[in-house]
Image: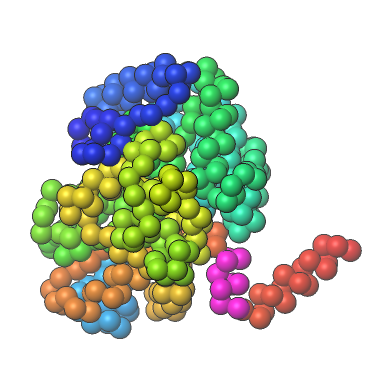
């Protein structure tokens, strides 16, 4: 991607005056880093020694046999350090923070994986760290909150609005405005004001560059289709970039269908009827909003997809029809998760399972000579409370009740 504030009609940098100098500094450091081959080599070294890069591309032999049709491969970002693709972006931004000489980082988080990654990075580099997280997400992602705090981060539950990801972003921006000289905002996805969409996508492109090599080694040719869940869009942009220039590879983004895109309880911006162009949180994209520009309530079983906006880069790619967007309902997600666990011994995050849903629908209709790749953006152990509740697991309920009584003694 070329350096740009806009991607077609989308993007930009709509920020308060007080942040202009801070953003100029960030732009300058980012441009210098992108033009410095030594920086990328430092980044690759960090990710290969501190994280688990390259992450594997796993052939899902049992799922392939079950569905027939195309061979199913899974890009295993769940095996990246902290359990998701989030570390790719966060560690890269951490190197930029060192260059800028700042000592404190803040971040928003929904599913908790970005918060986990940011807390990890802050511990490694010696930064003070504050994480903003909607109160709803704090409750459903308690294990991640526990580990963030144990790594020294301050986790601030956000009580405003829907108490989910968009509200955490708003609160993080308020903090940044008050602490611009000492603090860097580690934005977690390919959204927000420029240069964040492009910068986050650049760090995440490591996924796609690995996947291109890996599928060639294992399958001998590019895949027919690549699937990724889409919340803000960073994991999708990460893997899509590896195949963007090959028009023979179809790129499929899967949004949160929640209780159905006609129910009003979903987070589908690019494949539903409830989104429209708007400017919020510093950039222009498709937002779930009413005719007065007020943001709508969102719903997803997956905390990381429960967001009103989407990457401006993906809005552009949707408009250009380079990426096709679909949605997966909560029920479909649980079914795909259940099947994947039982057939492959792999536990996708609830977010990632959205991509599995669409791949399972389409792979049977392809040739056995074809392959598809699903980007498994994270691991599902963070979702144990939500998954156990969704499965209505009686032994888990008994464990929670019994453990609660024991700790009350």
- Please check the rendered image and state whether residue 386 is part of the magenta-colored stretch, yes or no: yes
Q: Is residue 23 left or right of residue 364?
A: right
The quarter of the displayed image where residue 222 is located: bottom left
Q: Could you tell me which residue is drawn at 24 percent across and 30 percent down?
A: 4
Observer-nearest of 45 and 292 = 292
- Please check the rendered image and state whether residue 224 is part of the magenta-colored stretch, yes or no: no
Up-down relation of residue 253 to residue 125 (above or below): below
Magenta part of the chain: 384-392
Q: Which colour scheme is used?
A: rainbow
Q: Could you tell me which residue is drawn at 41 percent across and 74 percent down?
A: 332
**Which residue appears farthest toward the front when viewing the image?**
292
* Picture coordinates of residue 139, whole percent (x, y): 64, 56
Q: Is residue 234 left or right of residue 393?
A: left
* Picture coordinates of residue 369, whole percent (x, y): 13, 74
**Which residue appears farthest toward the right when viewing the image?**
409
Q: Is residue 69 left or right of residue 190?
A: left
Q: Could you tell me which residue is drawn at 45 percent across and 68 percent down?
A: 263
Majority secondary structure of magenta residues: helix
* Picture coordinates of residue 274, whole percent (x, y): 38, 57
Observer-nearest of 245 and 321 = 321
């Amino acid at each position: 991607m070329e350096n740009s504030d806009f991607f077609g009609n989308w993007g930009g940098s709509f920020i308060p005056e007080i942040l202009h100098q801070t953003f100029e500094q960030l732009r300058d450091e980012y441009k210098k880093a992108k033009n410095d081959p030594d920086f990328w080599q430092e980044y690759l070294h960090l990710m290969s020694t501190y994280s688990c890069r390259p992450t594997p591309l796993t052939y899902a032999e049992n799922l392939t046999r079950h569905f027939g049709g195309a061979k199913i491969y899974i890009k295993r970002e769940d095996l990246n350090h902290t359990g998701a693709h989030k570390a790719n972006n966060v560690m890269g931004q951490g190197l930029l923070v060192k260059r800028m000489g700042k000592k404190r980082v803040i971040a928003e988080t929904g599913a908790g994986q970005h918060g986990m990654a940011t807390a990890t990075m802050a511990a490694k580099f010696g930064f003070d760290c504050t994480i903003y997280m909607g109160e709803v997400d704090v409750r459903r992602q308690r294990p991640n909150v526990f580990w963030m705090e144990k790594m020294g981060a301050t986790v601030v539950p956000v009580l405003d609005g829907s108490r989910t990801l968009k509200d955490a972003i708003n609160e993080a921006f308020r903090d940044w405005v008050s602490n611009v000289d000492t603090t860097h905002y580690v934005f977690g996805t390919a959204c927000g004001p420029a240069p964040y969409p492009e910068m986050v996508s650049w760090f995440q492109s490591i996924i796609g560059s690995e996947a291109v090599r890996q599928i060639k080694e294992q399958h001998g040719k590019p895949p027919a289709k690549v699937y990724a869940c889409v919340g803000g869009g960073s994991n999708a942009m990460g893997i899509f970039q590896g195949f963007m220039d090959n028009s023979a590879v179809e790129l499929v983004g899967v949004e949160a269908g929640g209780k159905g895109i006609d129910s009003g309880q979903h987070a589908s911006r690019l494949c539903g009827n409830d989104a429209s162009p708007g400017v919020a949180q510093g950039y222009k994209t498709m937002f779930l909003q009413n005719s007065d520009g007020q943001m709508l309530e969102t719903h997803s079983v997956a905390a990381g997809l429960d967001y009103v906006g989407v990457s401006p880069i993906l809005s552009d790619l949707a408009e250009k029809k380079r990426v096709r967007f679909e949605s997966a309902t909560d029920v479909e997600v649980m079914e795909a998760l259940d099947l994947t666990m039982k057939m492959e011994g792999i536990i996708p995050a609830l977010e990632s399972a959205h991509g599995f849903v669409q791949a399972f629908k389409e792979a049977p209709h392809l040739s056995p000579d074809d392959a598809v790749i699903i980007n498994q953006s994270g691991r599902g152990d963070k979702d144990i409370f939500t998954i156990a509740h969704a499965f209505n697991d009686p032994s888990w309920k008994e464990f929670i009740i019994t453990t609660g009584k024991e700790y009350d003694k």
